[in-house]
Amino acid sequence: MNFRCIGVAGEMFVLLFFVLMAHTADGDVSYSFPEEMKRGSVIGNIANDFGLDVNKLSSRKARIDTLGNRKRYCDINLNTGELTVAELIDREGLCNERISCPLNFELVLENPLEIHRVTIQIQDINDNTPAFPKDIIKLEISEISVKGARFRVTEAHDADIGNNGVQIYSIERNEHFILSVSAKVDGGKTIELVLDKELDREKQKELTLILTAVDGGTPPRSGTVAIHITVLDANDNAPVFSQAVYKVSLPENSPVDTIVVTVSATDADEGQNGEVTYEFSRISRTAKELFDLNENSGEIKVKGPTDFEEEVKYEMIIEGKDGSGLSSDTKIIIEITDVNDNDPIIVIKSLNNNVPENVLPGTEVGIINVQDRDSEQNGQEQNYRAHLQENNKPGSSICSVSATDPDWRQNGTVVYSLLSSDVNGASVSSFLSINGDTGVIHAVRSFDYEQLKSFKVLVLARDNGSPPLSSNVTVSVFITDENDNSPQILYPSPEGNSFMTEMVPKAAQARSLVSKVIAVDADYGQNAWLSYHIIKATDPGLFTIGVHSGEIRTQRDISESDSMKQNLIVSVRDNGQPSLSATCALYLLISDNLAEVPELKDMSRDESSSKLTFYLIIALVSVSTFFLTFIVIILAVRFCRRRKPRLLFDGAVAIPSAYLPPNYAEVEGAGTLRSTYNYDAYLTTGSRTSDFKFIRSYNEGTDLTLKKTQSAVDDLEGLGAAMSDSFQFVYNEN
């Protein structure tokens, strides 16, 4: 039992088997031959180079077999063994501008069977003349341009390569301009007219120069173009492309009008000087038949069929020019990606129809060659690819797999299942399911492109035989993006309660940058391409916004008559279908000093008044709390005063002798002590005893009599809970 694609693999195996069985001579032969040679021209003696007997070429049916579907450019003379030109070879038409241009074919002989590989490298000859894209290059140069100012002109194109390409540029002698030629990173040249003497529009309004391009061939070829210069007023800003190189991928066989890429250049000048138009500066004849450029929008669209098997990459130069002739250019690289659009081709190289019954094992009976013009996996063992748009409904079908089994009844009954695996840490069964009878694969959940872009699963096909036989295939699932995310504005804040004001100086001139809107989009590709538009403004003619940059600039100089307060409503739209958008508001104040704005003064005063009221409320609450706390403490103290005096000074129990040092003397008594000590009295509510803490000793040897001062008495009378005072007690150490 095999998948349908396994049959191709089997045929390839048979091919490899017979190729290995065939007798081939060691080594290949390679020739180098110039293009444009006449039919019948001798390339080389292929019989001698492979050591073949010329007399047996006819009997062995010697022939040239081309690979693929290419034309038969070469043939073999069976009488002489010479390899000759069968058809005129144009290197540019065959290989465009590629440095290497090989022709590959095989020399096939029979009886015995032999195959030899032959390669011819086609050499370039100087058969193309340098050509400029236009017959006349028009430039408009301001009369105030200073000496040394540079003005770029488009370079010439020569379909030949190497030294046969353009090597030298020159300009006829004149009093105003000299020519500057410099190499670019991509191998081209930057051609500039350098102003050597200032122009005077009153003396000469126009002048014409002849620019010549010469290649390095022998003999050399040259092409010319007329440069027509009109002297104008100042235009000091050339267009600037957003990218120096645009590199994109395009699937082959893309339909007509498919947008390949959009180039964009901005010009800081005003009016006509700031309007940019686009044109091809350098493009091959083949690419010009396949792609079209919108001169106003910069969109490059498909206008002809693209084929990966014919050409895999196209390069072109696009020039952006403003209304006064200043220009810059950018490089476009379009890489064609392969699509599985070619069926495998089975070619029988040699086949013996009659095979004797006593033939020995291993005898070659034929050669089968299987070819597929597609590349990589598109030309190989089968691989299912399924494309599913995000936000799909759970249960929707994605694709179906199919396997066949030539066995009979249950031995040929195929049952499908998903092999257990993980996708992003989760079981594959939580993503997909498969119908065991039909092989139809369904989505279990709704997919989000921003979370998961692609994944692979293995499908098992098993028969019901005993023992069961099985095979598997890989299914690649690709999630395609849908425009399901609106642009997110990062600055200014799009929230309605956010009031953001920016100052614009009164002296701001035209094209001055005053602010910028910044936004992002979570989608992919053109669904995330953003454009900025002012949909409402206090003065519609005062400010403008960059469509692709979001930069807000003044369109003209600020005047005294302009309103001080300027409000803008900006819309940010993506390029999806349908388009999604978001809006934000900007508040601009035309002023050099905040004190000049009455509204801000009132706002500041109101804010200060509001803060003062807030502080007064806090102070009032604090004072009230402190007052209530103070009242509670006073009441507690008065309550304790009514009870404590009797407890503290009630005869013998007021201060028990156990808490005093030995030889304690009464407070009211008289006597002398060798030392005097200072104590703190700690009185505890609810207790009939008092604790004393020893503090420090006075000078020994001094006899002092303890005196109870009026203040001490007053303190004792007013003593409350958790309060202390200091007393002096007479203490006799003897």
Image (cartoon, rainbow, N blue to C red):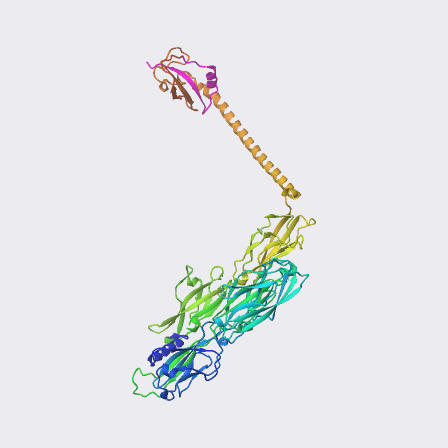
Residue 147 in the image: above or below residue 415: above
In the displayed image of the protein, which residue is found farthest to the right?
Answer: 561
Where does the image place residue 465, in percent across and percent down from the top left?
A: 35, 74
Q: Quadrant of residue 528?
A: bottom right
In-image side of 636 versus 556 (left or right)? left
**Nearer to the camera, 633 or 693:** 693
Q: Which residues are magenta?
A: 705-734
**Nearer to the camera, 346 or 663:** 346
Q: Is residue 157 visible?
A: no
Q: Which corner quadrant holds the N terminus?
A: bottom left
Where does the image place residue 138, in percent across and percent down from the top left?
A: 62, 66
Q: Quadrant of residue 153?
A: bottom right
Where does the image place residue 683, in percent across and percent down from the top left?
A: 43, 22
In-image side of 710 versus 406 (left or right)? right
Q: Which corner quadrant holds the C terminus?
A: top left
| Residue 634 covered by magenta stretch | no
**Nearer to the camera, 436 or 384:** 384
Where does the image place residue 146, in percent across and percent down from the top left?
A: 61, 57
